[in-house]
Image (tube, coloured by chain):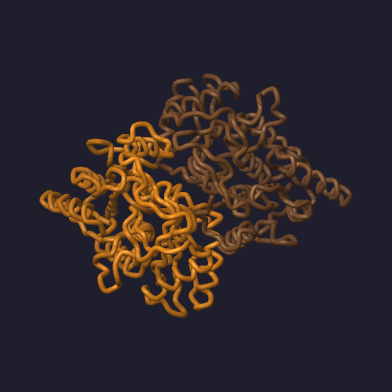
Chain colours: A orange, B brown
Amino acid sequence: MKKILNAPQDYADQALQGMCLAFPHLYAQSGEAGRVITRAAPAKDKPGIVSGGGSGHLPTFAGYVGAGLLDACAVGNVFAGPAVMDCIDAIRAADNGKGVLLLFGNYGGDKMNFAMAAEMLEAEGIETRTVLASDDVGSASRDERVKRRGVAGLIYAYKVAGARAEQQGATLEAVAGVAQRALDNTVTIGVALSPCTVPEAGKPTFSLAENEMEMGMGIHGEPGIRRGPLLAADTLADEMLSTLLKDGGLKAGDRVAVMLNSLGATPLEELFILWRRVQSGLAAQNISWFPPQIGRYATSMEMAGASLTLMKLDKELEQLLAAPVASPWWSNAQ
Amino acid sequence: MKKILNAPQDYADQALQGMCLAFPHLYAQSGEAGRVITRAAPAKDKPGIVSGGGSGHLPTFAGYVGAGLLDACAVGNVFAGPAVMDCIDAIRAADNGKGVLLLFGNYGGDKMNFAMAAEMLEAEGIETRTVLASDDVGSASRDERVKRRGVAGLIYAYKVAGARAEQQGATLEAVAGVAQRALDNTVTIGVALSPCTVPEAGKPTFSLAENEMEMGMGIHGEPGIRRGPLLAADTLADEMLSTLLKDGGLKAGDRVAVMLNSLGATPLEELFILWRRVQSGLAAQNISWFPPQIGRYATSMEMAGASLTLMKLDKELEQLLAAPVASPWWSNAQ
């Protein structure tokens, strides 16, 4: 296992500890086992936003706690959902009496645990709303969107909901509404080239032959649409883009946000090689774009591969996307 | 070869094209073959700063062109130095009549080509100064510092020289002076876990057994200090830190900038696991630190491994490090 770690069972905890130690002006650690990340300087007088999910995807999820983004995040083991108690603690930490948006990916364990937490807190008078990311077009057909997994598109929802929540007089309903609208307009497709290793398992999550890729594979190695020979970058970009344009119903005159995300090992060079083609494909369809997000936003540790996300923009979504933010993982210089 | 590319010989060019297309407000491409990257909005009335080097290390080198950093960069093929003509064009582009600092790594080809370029431009009346990064303690002993290679420490020199050059009335001498002082106080050690593949070669640059690492390996796979079993993260952090503290002559009461850099595939989780231990090691020595740089600053495409850099700070270096910058690859939120 080519990983830098101590005891495999300490991987998630030590990674979180290190993140909070590195950026004490941004993050604080709480919860029974330190699995709740909150802002070092908690916000006041605004609807809260909480997310949660497994470890192994940094900067997703906990890295996006910060001004203009999340208030708190509940963190599970590598590729496992957060515990109910941590969901509860995260929601409590994010609550300022204006309610809390629960914004996370469409996975069974996460849904169940957040639902239990929300129900228990309702009794305490904390109002919550839940919005799920289900942007992964590789995980189910468009007719079965409710089955689709959430992947990198969730970050766009963090960004727009986070910016909306900071606006004066924002309500939980408005914040949940804009997160839902963002996600209703967001589609992602991923491609995997090589696996990662979950520390406690000690072996790769799947195997792919030397010249093979899997289109549509999930960020935990869930099966995708098809396996096949590794395509040339331009062919790959064309296939990913046309899949998203069709699934998202995008058409000439639309404007989109575009995230080209490395799953971990795939270098910036290769994202930029893909970008040339994605950009010319968008231009050919007369679709315009907001300055793109290109880098590592939602990873699977050292997995090689990439995902492409499109969010169809309206005026408000674009303003929220451009709003200032204090995070090492979101640059407004882009 | 698990890489996303078109023709291998187009890798470097298409990556650069994609970067400039993605961020047209930051970068412009020029030079005979597009291998010179300049600021989209060139600076005026300041000493210029030019760097250069091979492709395959993004965001190093060309990514650091931008306000508060470099004015121009000459880019070679993957792991190969830039051409003389591109060095010339980069220097010309960066010149505003106040001279140009040539700030790059201590590699034979780069030195020779920049020296030829500088000599030719001297005849045109463009004054240059050269400052070389030779921060890699794994590449030669301290007594032979002139033989040491330049690695991630170069980024700190970009940052402080870039900030100094933007100050009113800055002279070439002052900018070169602060770059040299930064590098005189900067030491880096790297560790490699697995290789990368140069596209045109089509095979890994070296091989390491499943449970093996190489301490001190260079960013092009140059031999390091020793091979051995992959150490536990804490042991690895201790060894890297103690090597740097000793080599850099750091002592109680000193203050440092710290960069913990992934060579590509190694995920943020593992950098944060290392960081806990690096931070406690610094604290134990009563050495304080500026908010650390943790991420991918100088990579070798998909190589797994990490480097640790320390720069001993004085008041001016710290102020320059904290100065504003417009770059997707340097976050002041850190």
Q: Residue at x 27, y 46 (%)?
A: A74
- Farthest residue to the bottom: give it: A252
How many discs mark residues in the rendered view? Answer: 0
- Residue B221: x and y in percent read 60, 40
Q: Is residue B320 visible?
A: no
In this view, the residue in front, A2 or A266, is A2
- Residue A86: x and y in percent read 22, 43
Residue A5's place in the image compared with A299, above or below, is above
- Farthest residue to the left: give it: A123
- Farthest residue to the right: give it: B123
In this view, the residue in front, A235 or B236, is A235
In this view, the residue in front, B265 or A54, is B265
- Residue A263: x and y in percent read 43, 53
Q: Residue at x 76, y 46 (%)?
A: B100
Horizontal side of residue B78 vs B252, given as left or right: right
- Residue B307: x and y in percent read 53, 36
Q: Residue at x 37, y 67 (%)?
A: A187
Horizontal side of residue A1 vs B318, given as left or right: left
Q: Is residue A211 visible?
A: yes
Snapshot quadrant of residue A29: top left
Q: Residue at x 29, y 45 (%)?
A: A75
Residue B295's place in the image compared with B313, above or below, is below
Horizontal side of residue B147 vs A257, given as left or right: right
